[in-house]
């Protein structure tokens, strides 16, 4: 069971997550349009991540030139595209991937009703993996709400696509086992529910440790 944790704010935090067995260590990257975005900070954080853990660059923007800049500057192990699907379409993603055969791309999929299944299918085979997340209509980005959504829809998506699927949306140590049991994904993602409670957007390492242990306890 892959475990992905957002959002990492320092090299020290990244090294701590490597030690806890986190597979995907996520950093928010951009031009400052969204809070806490920084290409320079991401470069420092990625340099602190050692195998088998991988760095994930999350870009919430739909601007192609910015995404291309992130790719060229950071060369991330995984590029995670989190813009709303009406702003960053499958055809645009195909163009982004052209000539970048070694680039692994994760695409966020908004889960809100039955239409989400068709949206996920439209990226199947274009994205290398999908991340299913909660979404508020009208938002330019997907996720970061700290609330759950329908795991039954998640399960339908997992069963209808060929690429690996991670699930997100309000997942923490207290509900990750239930989510995995229902959905049977390739991996799970946590941000809000493994943060400290002080609003600093830094990680509570004890929460992360419990999340990792409980998620991976189901691997057998």
Image (cartoon, helix red, strand yellow):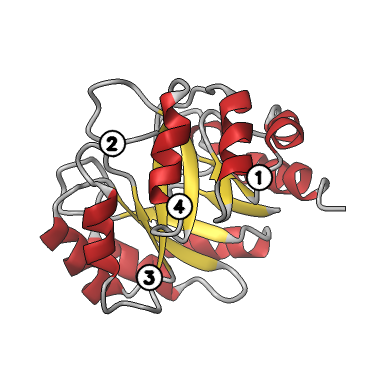
The residue singled out by tag 1 in the image is 185
Lower position in the chain sequence, tag 2 or tag 3: 3
Front: mark 1 or 2:
1
The residue singled out by tag 2 in the image is 141
The residue singled out by tag 4 in the image is 124
Front: mark 1 or 3:
1
Q: Bin the neighbour count of mark 2 within 10 Å (Cα to Cα): few under 14, some 14-19, many 20 and up.
A: many
Q: Judge whether residue 201 can be spotted in this image.
A: no
Q: Bin the neighbour count of mark 3 within 10 Å (Cα to Cα): few under 14, some 14-19, many 20 and up.
A: many
x and y percent of residue 47 in the render?
42, 75
* Nearer-the-camera pick, 4 or 81: 81
Q: Secondary structure at mark 4?
A: loop
Q: Is residue 11 left or right of residue 215?
A: left
Q: Residue at x 56, y 48 (%)?
A: 165
Query: Marks 4/1: CA distance?
Result: 15 Å
The residue singled out by tag 3 in the image is 76
Query: Marks 2/3: CA distance?
Result: 20 Å
């Amino acid at each position: 069971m892959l475990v992905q944790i957002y959002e990492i704010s320092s090299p020290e935090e990244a090294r701590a997550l490597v030690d806890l067995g986190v597979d995907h260590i996520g950093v928010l990257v951009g031009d400052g349009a969204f809070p806490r975005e920084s290409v320079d900070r991401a470069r420092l954080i990625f340099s602190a991540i050692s195998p088998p853990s991988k760095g994930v660059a999350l870009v919430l923007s739909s601007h192609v030139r910015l995404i291309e800049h992130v790719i060229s500057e950071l060369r991330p192990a995984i590029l995670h595209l989190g813009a709303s699907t009406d702003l960053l379409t499958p055809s645009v993603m195909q163009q982004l991937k052209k000539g970048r055969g070694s680039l692994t791309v994760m695409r966020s999929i908004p889960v809100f009703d039955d239409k989400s299944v068709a949206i996920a299918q439209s990226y199947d085979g274009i994205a290398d993996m999908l991340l299913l997340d909660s979404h508020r209509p009208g938002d330019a980005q997907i996720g970061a709400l700290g609330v759950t959504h329908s795991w039954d829809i998640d399960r339908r998506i997992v069963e209808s696509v060929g690429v690996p699927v991670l699930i997100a949306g309000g997942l923490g140590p207290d509900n990750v086992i239930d989510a995995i049991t229902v959905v049977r994904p390739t991996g799970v993602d946590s941000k809000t529910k493994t943060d400290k409670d002080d609003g600093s957007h830094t990680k509570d390492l004890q929460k992360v440790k419990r999340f990792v242990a409980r998620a991976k306890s189901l691997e057998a």
